[in-house]
Every structure is written in C-alpha cells, then in structure tokens.
Amino acid sequence: MKRLSVTAEKSGFDIGTEAASPVVGVMLMLSVTLILAALVSGFVGGLPDGGTKASNVAIKATYSQTEGLAVTHMGGDVIGTLDTVVIVRLSNSFGDAEHMSWKIDPCSIVNKRGELTKTVPWLTKTGSAGVVSFAAGDTAYVVPDKAKQNTGEYLQNGLKSDNKYSFDNKANLGKEFLLEFCDTSGTTFARTRVIIAP
C-alpha cells in the first residue's frame, strides 16, 4: 500500500492521509455493544423502580387464652410502628373461615405485660406516638380489654368468647391463626403461625 502525503504549505508539516477511522469505528462498536448489554441486563434482571425496599423481618408469636398475645421480633430490619399494620387472619384449622381477618388496634399493642398505667402503647388514645420502633429482641403484647376481661375479644374487634371463631373459646384450643405485619400500602413483610394455648 502506497502512502500518500500532503504537505501543508504554510506550516511545513507532513500530514498523512492514514485516518483514525478504524480506531473510531472499533470504539463506536464497543460503545454500542456495552449499551446494548446494559439494556438487556436491565430487562432480564429488572430495572430499579426507585421504590422503597421491602422490610426483612422475622417474628414469632404466642397466644394464651389467659395471657393474651405476645410477639417477638426475632431479627431483621427495625420496624416503624406508626407505618405498620398488624393483622390477625384465621387459618384453615378454623374450617371455612380462613377468609376472616382483623386489624389489631395499635393502641392495644404495648411494650410490656402488666398494668396499663405502666405500659407504653404503639399509639396512644390521643393519636400521638408511643413506642415508635420495634427492633430485634423486642417483644410487644396485645393487652386484654380490662372492661370485659377478655383478651381474644379485644384482639378480634368484638367477637364474644363463646363465638365459635373466638380465640378465647375453649373449643379452639390447639387451632392456629396467622399474624401478619404489613406496611401501610398493604404489602405483608412478616408472617407467623400462632397456636392457641390455654
């Protein structure tokens, strides 16, 4: 291949006609390939939606007809109590009633067992924050309705203890229900099965 040269009259420099186009071409092809690879990877792996990350929480709960409900945070993210909805859902051990569910009033979820005057609720009756976070190692309790002395009735928004679905009904000993923690949009981020004990 014969090399041609052009001489610049004023500058006296020898300018070669060998262009940089092969290098530019390779760089453009490499750029296009990288962009396509990123797009394919995004669609296959899912593009980030910019939404909030779901909580990663493990909970364990016990229910006693005499002591009520106790929920322990076993590990994972700290839960903001004001942004959490706690739901009780009947399991298939109750037969055809597994569609039944109740939301637990955050005013009845407290930081310890005992007299109501010595406990702090997740939400006070006046609407202000009480316990604002639920972290690993913490235990929360659902207090009984002191006026009726019936934990299950308070937990289930008015079911009488002789109702066949009530947790305080002696016929339901050994049956299970589900306890679910959801965010305010309705996404469940923690769930556990609870056995009804005496």
Image: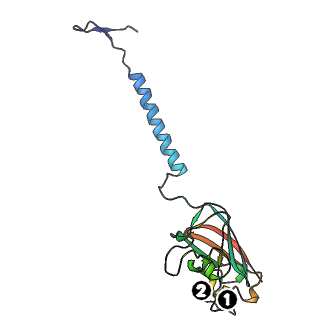
The residue under the point 52% across, 45% down is 41
Residue 72 disc label: none
Q: Which residue is mark 2?
A: 157
Outermost residue to the left: 10
The residue under the point 61% across, 81% down is 117
Q: Which of the two residues, 93 or 179, is positioned nearer the viewer here?
A: 179
Asked which quadrant contains residue 121, the reply is bottom right
Asked which quadrant contains residue 56, the reply is bottom right
Horizontal side of residue 182 vs 10, given as left or right: right
Tally of marks: 2
Q: Secondary structure at mark 1?
A: loop
The residue under label 1 is which amino acid type? Asn
The residue under label 2 is which amino acid type? Asn
Position in image of residue 192 (x %, y %): 68, 70
Outermost residue to the front: 118
Crowding around mark 2 (Cα neighbors within 10 Å: few <14, some 14 to 19, many 20+) is few
Which part of the image, by quadrant, shows the C terminus?
bottom right
Asked which quadrant contains residue 119, the reply is bottom right
Q: Which of the two residues, 92 or 83, is positioned nearer the viewer here?
A: 83
Which part of the image, by quadrant, shows the N terminus?
top left
Mark with earlier residue (2, 1): 1
Contact between marks 2 and 1 (CB within 8 A): the answer is no
Compared to 51, does 123 lie above or below?
below
Looking at the image, can residue 123 be seen?
yes
Q: Secondary structure at mark 2?
A: loop
Q: Which residue is mark 1?
A: 150
The residue under the point 46% across, 39% down is 35
Q: How is the image coloured?
A: rainbow
Q: Which of the two residues, 19 or 130, is positioned nearer the viewer here?
A: 130
Crowding around mark 1 (Cα neighbors within 10 Å: few <14, some 14 to 19, many 20+) is many
Compared to 174, does 58 lie above or below?
above
Badge nearest the viewer, 2 or 1: 1
